[in-house]
Image (cartoon, rainbow, N blue to C red):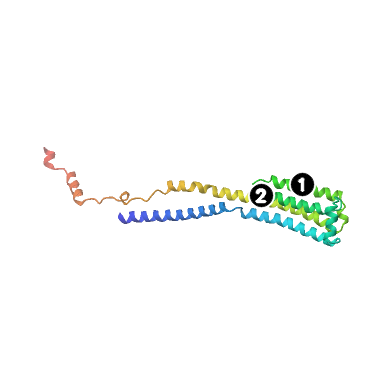
Amino acid sequence: MESISGSSVDSRATLRGINTASLSARLESYEASEKKCISDVRRTFCLFVTFDLLFITLLWIIELNVNGGIETQLDKEVLHYDYHASFFDIFLLAVLRFASLILAYAVCKLRHWWAIALTTAATSAFLIAKVILSKLLSQGAFGYLLPIISFILAWIETWLLDFKVLPQEADDENRFRPINNIPERASFMHPGPLSDGQFYSPPESVADSDDELLDDKHDPEKDFI
């Protein structure tokens, strides 16, 4: 009996050690994710927003250099801005989109789509109106390239946030939420180590058992009396 009780205690201790190690690993993973300033998928989104700004800036600089030199075109498109012929407003739109999205989703860490919905709607409306009303299409390849690429990048950002960032963060939060209740459940499911006394059963005495057998036998003389 002592060997059986000892093996039971050892098996319970082993299971408790395995559960504790697994729980501590999950808690460390959760705490590490909480300590991060920003999630991986949100950081990817912010990098793409930065790429949007840099790519539009690069295209605009190339357009300035191709059409007569950077200084000359800056004076023409910025200082003497003309809505119908200038690309400066498309660059400025990219800057405003970058500032708004980084402020909303990197600094303030919003978990809603309303900010990017506003920027994408404003970008789409402005670009469509500019293509219809301006004379960009008569200015060569950049008249097509800058509006189209700006429009596509804005909608890719919307897709990334709505279908990747927000769902992934919601799934991570739901996955780690039950961890806070695991220690309480573990304390009920795995109580403290059981003492040997709880498994100990005293051996039967041979003398006592013999006495009981003798008492069970009826004495003929006592029955006669």
Question: What residue lies at 73% left-to-right and 45% top-to-bottom?
Answer: 118
Q: Position of residue 133 (x, y in %)?
A: 86, 48
Tell me which corner region of the image, top left, top right, bottom left or bottom right, holds residue 18: bottom left
Q: Is residue 125 above or below residue 138?
A: above
Q: Secondary structure at mark 1?
A: helix
In the image, what residue type sits under mark 1? Ala
Residue 36 left/right relative to 84: left
Given residues 212 and 158, the one toward you in this image is 158
Q: Nearer the viewer, residue 162 or 98?
A: 98
Q: Nearer the viewer, residue 110 or 209?
A: 110
| Residue type, numbered disc 2 | Tyr
Q: Position of residue 83 (x, y in %)?
A: 85, 50
- Residue 137 location, x and y as percent? 86, 55
**Residue 212 picture location, percent across and down:** 19, 46
Which image quarter is the C terminus in?
top left
Circles 1 and 2: CB distance less than 8 Å? no
**Residue name at image x 80 percent, y 51 percent:** 89
Q: Which mark is residue 105?
A: 2
Structural distance between the alpha carbons of marks 1 and 2: 18 Å
The N terminus appears in which quarter of the rendering? bottom left
- The numbered mark, 1 or 2, whose residue comes first in the sequence reads 2
Q: Tell me, for residue 122, which label it has, or none.
A: 1
